[in-house]
Amino acid sequence: QVQLVESGGGLVQPGGSLRLSCVASGSILSIFRLGWYRQAPGKERELVASITSGGDTNYENFVKGRFTITKDDAKNTVYLQMNGLKPDDTAVYFCNAETLGPPIEAHWGQGTQVTVSA
C-alpha cells in the first residue's frame, strides 16, 4: 500500500501562486507514476499533470506554461508549482500514485483545497 499526504492549498488571488506538496510513504518502490488531479464542484475529477519515475512529465493543455510538476526522490515528495492562477483553477487537488502490478493500482491522497478568488 501507498499513503499520500497533500499540503499547500489555500486561498490566493487571481494571478497568484501556490505550491502543493505530496509526501508518499509505504510501498514507494512500486510507484511508477505520480500525478496531480483536481475536482471542482459539480465536475468530474481530471488530470492536471503527471511525472514518471524516470522524470518524464505530462501536462493537460489548460495548465501548460503555468504549472510545473517536479519530484524529490530523496524526500519521497512530488510538487505542483502553480503560477498565474485563475478562478477556474479553484478545486480540490488530489495527489495520485500508480503502482506496478499486476494489476496496476491507483492510490489517492485526501485532497487539498485551492481557491482562487479576489
Image (spheres, rainbow, N blue to C red):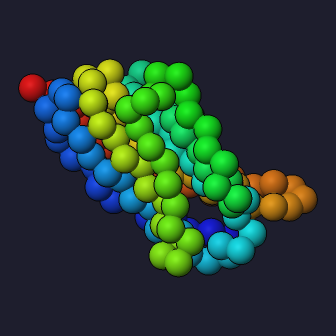
Above or below for 18 versus 70: above
| The one of 66 and 112 positioned closer to us in this rendering | 66
**Image quarter of residue 86:** top left
Determine whether, in the image, residue 54 is placed left or right of residue 15. right
Q: Nearer the viewer, residue 55 or 22?
A: 55
Identified at 19% across, 36% down, the residue is 16
Where is residue 104? Give x, y as percent.
81, 54
Query: Looking at the image, which residue sits at the far right?
Result: 102
Please indicate, yes or no, whether residue 92 appears anywhere in the rendered image: no
Q: Quadrant of the C terminus?
A: top left
Residue 13 rendering spot, x and y as whole percentages = 14, 32
In the rendered image, the vertical position of residue 55 relative to residue 67, given as above or below: below
The residue furthest left is 118
Q: Residue, x 55% and y 28% (percent of image)?
A: 60
Residue drawn at 38 percent across, 32 percent down: 66
Q: Position of residue 72 (x, y in %)?
A: 50, 68
Would residue 104 appear left or right of 18 to someone viewing this image?
Answer: right
> Residue at 25% across / 23% down in the picture?
87
Q: Is residue 87 visible?
A: yes
